[in-house]
Image (cartoon, rainbow, N blue to C red):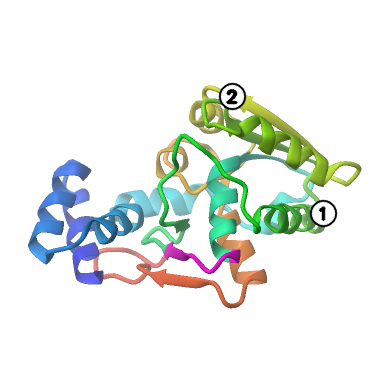
């Protein structure tokens, strides 16, 4: 898988489309669908890694700042970590879950603990306000919005939960610090924080992480 990641990163850095490159590499190494999905979510070219490093901020910078959160993106990764699901540490240093986002969200046992973990972290870091963005078209977004508001009621910092039809654009165009692992957003936003990785490494010692972070084609992210 690491050899395949090297090849995919090399091709991505030379202008091959991701779809074409993934098919070439996947066929060469005889990868199954799940392995191809892991590879797709973990690979990044040197240029992409370097750009994401430049725009990434460290936790100390969060004090006094407003944070805009890619709600499903962050929550699903933390749910997976708390539930023993596999996580992928990509070549860009970003932690992602393996499951693809579907059109239907289902609350799990780890949902509330994940939200409580986030709330505690925001208090410690001194974030002034949290804007939590949820994709309106995803089924049960309204129920999740109410659960989040119930979980964080009366605590600091203030959370605003917004259902939106243009989450990616809102995050990418925000002038605030963004919390997301979505590559398309990371490549467009001004500043971002590696929130899921920070929380998992600090609070979930037994998380199952498959590390793609070291490779011959990628700088140390």
Name the residue at 54% across, 72% down: 207
**Percent position (x, y) of residue 74?**
57, 49
Q: Which residue is mark 1?
A: 123
What is the quadrant of the N terminus in the image?
A: bottom left
Taking the image as shown, residue 13 lies to the left or right of residue 132, namely: left
What is the quadrant of the C terminus in the image?
A: bottom left
Question: CB atoms at circles 2 and 1 under 8 Å apart?
Answer: no
Query: How crowded is the residue under tag 1: few (<14 C-alpha within 10 Å), some, or many (20+)?
Result: some
Taking the image as shown, residue 42 lies to the left or right of residue 167, namely: left
Is 86 inside the magenta-drawn segment?
A: yes
Q: Secondary structure at mark 2?
A: strand
Q: Residue furthest bottom?
A: 206
Is 102 inside the magenta-drawn segment?
A: no
**Percent position (x, y) of residue 178?**
59, 41
In this view of the protein, which residue sits in the foreground, 125 or 211? 211
Q: Is residue 22 above or below residue 185?
A: below
In this view of the protein, which residue sits in the foreground, 192 or 169? 169
Name the residue at 42% across, 52% down: 99
Q: Which residue is mark 2?
A: 164
């Amino acid at each position: 898988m690491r050899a395949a990641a090297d090849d995919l990163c090399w091709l991505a850095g030379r202008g091959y489309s991701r779809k074409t490159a993934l098919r070439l590499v996947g066929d060469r190494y005889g990868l199954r669908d799940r392995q191809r999905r892991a590879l797709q979510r973990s690979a990044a070219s040197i240029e992409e890694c370097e750009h994401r490093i430049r725009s990434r901020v460290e936790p100390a910078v969060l004090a006094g700042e407003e944070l805009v959160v890619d709600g499903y993106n962050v929550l699903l990764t933390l749910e997976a970590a708390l539930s023993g699901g596999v996580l992928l540490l990509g070549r860009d240093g970003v932690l992602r879950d393996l499951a693809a986002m579907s059109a239907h969200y289902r609350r799990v046992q780890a949902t509330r603990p994940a939200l409580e973990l986030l709330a505690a972290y925001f208090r410690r870091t001194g974030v002034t306000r949290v804007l939590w963005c949820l994709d309106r078209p995803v089924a049960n977004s309204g129920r999740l919005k109410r659960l989040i508001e119930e979980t964080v009621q009366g605590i600091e910092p203030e959370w605003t939960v917004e259902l939106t039809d243009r989450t990616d654009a809102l995050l990418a165009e925000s002038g605030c610090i963004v919390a997301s692992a979505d590559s398309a957003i990371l490549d467009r936003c001004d500043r971002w924080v590696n929130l899921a990785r920070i929380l998992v490494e600090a609070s979930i010692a037994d998380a199952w992480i498959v590390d793609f972070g070291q490779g011959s084609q990628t700088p140390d992210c």
